[in-house]
Image: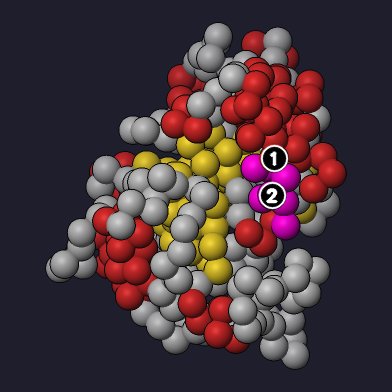
Amino acid sequence: MGKIPALGLGTWKAAPGEVTEAVKVAIDVGYRHFDCAYFYHNESEVGAGIQHKIKEGVVKREDLFIVSKSPHQGWLKRMASFLVFKPGEKDLPLDHNGMAIPSETDYLQTWEAMEDLVFTGLVKYIGVSNFNHEQLDRLLNKPDLRVKPITNQIECHPYLTQQNLIKFCQSRDVSVTAYRPLGGSCAGVDLMDDPVIQAVAQKYNKSPAQILIRFQVQRGVIVIPKSVNPGRIQENIQVFDFELAEQDVSDLLCLDKDFRMARFPIPEKLACVAPLPLQKMLASTLLLQGTPLDWQRRPWPVMGVAHSDLEGCLCEAA
């Protein structure tokens, strides 16, 4: 997993009034990896929590791995100025059907702009998100590739095990980061209510959430569970004092339904995002985010998904 901490705190849909305290608690109990995004509308609150702990002397900035997502240049042109954009307005250019309006820029061009961020010292690492096998392979085989992606952030849990994609990423020395690892509820399905997961949790005297997180850790997958509950934040990091038996891991893998719980406003022929503006980034690593085409079963290369739709992603800023 390289320089990315194996476990981080997700902040998607964490309310601004709650996330500052959640970050403080997370740092106190040992989290050093935070996953953020502009479209979450809470990055300033996440930053406030981090700054508070830095001022207290609990951590130094260099101890932390902070991931963010920044709107791309094409998005900025359509939505006017990034500097005067007000949260609460439409974050994403949508058509009359509520679907994201695509840019036509090739994501390899976006990647070149992201590489520039590394060489100018604005970010330390860059990566991708929601890339399928074909998209990632095309990027890795880019003739003049200067910086390899450090990670591919994808939805992953026992109902969507992503075994082939994970195997491909790891074979190409690209780590995998699992978002929505606890599944949550979708279409009347709640992952943690699954009887197999409940049985494994009872066997190890752990919570279903701890089992789902440990499942990813043992697969060599970085995991970013989201919570603002202090007790759950602490519980979620307490997964390094036990190990799942090989049969239990196998049983969890057998739950795969190719069932994606994240839902995004992606039109049929979403093209690629435009290059990111070269601006000072607060994150540690920049990820270029694509739409989950393995879900759509479509061959078009894309960059963007809902909260990160039409986004580039940051993963470690200088």
Q: Which residue is mark 2?
A: 44
Magenta segment range? 41-47
Say what amino acid the circle numbered 2 marks: Ser
Residue 83 occupies which quadrant of the picture? bottom right
Q: Which residue is mark 1?
A: 48
Q: Does the segment drawn in magenta span residue 123?
A: no
Q: What kind of element bears circle 1?
A: helix
* Residue neighbourhood size for the residue with mark 2, other residues' Cα within 10 Å, grouped as few (<14), some (14–19), many (≥20): few
Q: What kind of element bears circle 2?
A: helix
User: What percent of the width, then of the height, locates residue 169?
Assistant: 33, 48
User: What percent of the width, then of the height, locates residue 318?
Assistant: 41, 45
Is residue 142 in view from this perspective? yes
Residue 224 occupies which quadrant of the picture? top right
273 with respect to 51 (left or right): left
Say what amino acid the circle numbered 1 marks: Ala
User: What percent of the width, then of the height, locates residue 22?
Assistant: 74, 32
**Residue drawn at 61 percent across, 73 percent down:** 82
**Residue drawn at 74 percent across, 81 percent down:** 98
Nearest the viewer among 92 and 118 is: 118
Magenta-drawn stretch, dominant element (helix, strand or loop): helix
Give the total number of marks visible in the rendering: 2
21 with respect to 209 (left or right): right
Q: Is residue 179 above or below residue 246?
A: below
**Residue drawn at 50 percent across, 32 percent down:** 61
Where the N terminus falls, by quadrant?
top left
Is the C-beta separation of discs 2 and 1 under 8 Å? Answer: yes
